[in-house]
Amino acid sequence: MTQFFGTDGIRGKTGSFPITPDFFVKIGYAAGLVLTKHHDLETNPSVVIGKDTRISGYMFESALESGFAAAGVDVYLTGPLPTPAIAFLTKALNADIGVSITASHNPYDDNGIKLFSNQGTKLPQSIEREIEEIVESDIKVVPAHRLGKAKRLDDARDRYEAFCLSTLPKNFTLAGKKIILDCAHGATYQVAPSIFSRLGADIQIINNQPNGLNINENAGSIHPEFLIKAVLIAKADLGIAFDGDGDRLIMVDELGQLIDGDQILFLLLRSYLQQNIMSGGLVGTLMSNLALEEKCKEMNIPFIRAKVGDKYVAEALREKKWIIGGENSGHIVLLDKHSTGDGIISSLQLIASLQSNQESLSQALSNFPMYPQKLINITSIGKFNVDGNEVKPLIEQANQMMEGKGRVLIRESGTQPLIRVMTEGPDVEKVIKSAQFLADSINQTSQ
C-alpha cells in the first residue's frame, strides 16, 4: 500500500494523505495558485518536476503536471534525476519552484515530495503553509489561454553533470583510482557513473538496475554491507553508496570500514581549513556523534546542533552565515558548492581532499575515533509521546546506566512511523544496554 510522506512540511487540513493521484493534482494546483500570487502575471510561472525511480513516480508526475497546468503554471519535466539536480535546475532555469517526487531512503511503496524555492533552497515554511491552506479546495481551471504548458528537459542530466564537475579544480582527474558506486537502484543510477567515468575513474557499479520496485532494496546507504563486500573483493580505493534520491551518501574505505556522515563532515571541515575557505562554524544535528563536537572544540571551530533533517541544517547555516554542516546519516550541506545537500558533490569534494593530501580514506580518519552509538527504531503506534512526562525519568535511568558518560536521544522520525532511540558513550556495552532498556520501556508503555 502506497503511503505518502510530505517530507518538507505540506499537510492537508485533515493531516492525512490519500494515496490516489487526485491529491497530487491538488498539491500541484494549490502550489500553482500560490505561485501566481507571487508572480508577474504577464507570463506564466514555471515549475521543474523530477523524480526518483520508484514506480509510483510515473503516476504522481502526471498528476502534478495536470495540477500545475490547471493553475496556469508551465511545467519542465526532467525524468529520473537526483533531488539536488532539481534544486540546481530550478535556480538555473529561473523557475519559480522545484518539485522532486521521492520518498528518499524509504521502500518503493512509499512516496512523497520535496519542494524547492527559486533559489534552489528548501521551500520556506510560510509558502508551505499557504499551499496547505488551499490544498483541499476545489479546482477551478484557469481560462484556456492561461493554461500551463509542459516540456521535457532533454538536457537536464547534462546540465547537472556539468554543474557537479564545475565544483572541482581544473584538470582534476580520478585516473588510476578504483571506486565502487552503489546507486541504490535510485535516481543516481545514470548520472553518478557518468560523472565518475568522465573523471577517469576505474568504476564498478552495483545496484543500478532500477525496475520501479527495487529502490533502496538491500542496496544503497541504508544497506552498506553490500558495498563493503564489493570494495573488499575488488580491492578498491573506496566505495560510495547513495540513497534513493541521491541527496546523501555513506562511504567505505579501502579496508572495508564504514564511513558515516559525521566522519565525512570532519574530513570536509579539515579540507576547508586547509584551503583557507572555512567561514564561521559547523552545524550538526541532535544525532551527530559527540566526537565531532569535541573535535570542533579542539580545532576552535564553533559547533551547534540543529534538529534532525538537512532542511534544518541548511536553515541554521544561512542564519549563521556559515557554509558547512550535515547529518550522520550522510546528508552533507556545502553552501559554497550547492544550495542543498548533494551526495555526488560531497563525495567528489572529499575525494579531491584525499588526493590533495596524498592519503587513503582510512589514513585520513586515523586520528578521529568515534564514540559508539546504538540506534533502535521502534514502530510507532501512537501511544507513546516523546515529549510526555514519562520520558524524562527514562532518560535519567539510561544516563545512570552509562554512569553519566554518554548521551541519550528519543525522537519521532520525520519520514516514517517510527520512534528512534539513540544512545552514545565511551563504553559500547553500556551504550547498547541503555538503548535496549529504553526500547523495551517504550514498547511496554505503548502496549
Image: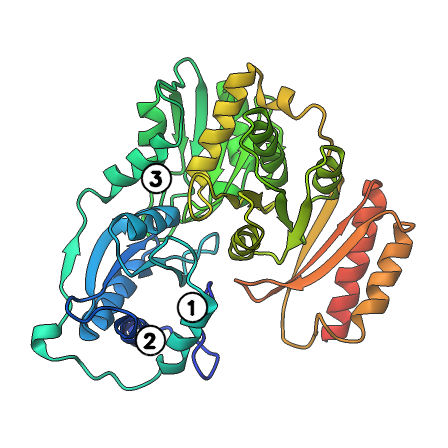
Query: Which residue in the protein does label 2 denote?
Result: 23
Residue 366 shows which numbered tag? none
Which x, y percent locates residue 167? 39, 32
Secondary structure beneath dot 3 equals: loop
Q: Alpha carbon of mark 1 to alpha carbon of mark 3: how far?
A: 23 Å
Q: Is residue 40 above or below residue 104?
A: below
Disc 1 or 3, which lies upstream in sequence?
A: 1
Q: Which sits in the foreground, 62 or 89?
A: 89
Q: Which residue is mark 1?
A: 4
Quarter of the image with the N terminus is: bottom left
The CA span between labels 2 and 1 is 10 Å
Q: Please report contact status of discs 2 and 3: CB closer than 8 Å, yes or no.
A: no
As helix, strand or loop, the secondary structure at mark 1 comes to strand
x and y percentages locating residue 132 in the rendered image: 41, 77
Disc 3 target residue? 189
Q: Position of residue 33 (x, y in %)?
A: 28, 76
Name the one closer to the observer, 104 or 444.
Answer: 104
- Number of numbered discs on residues: 3
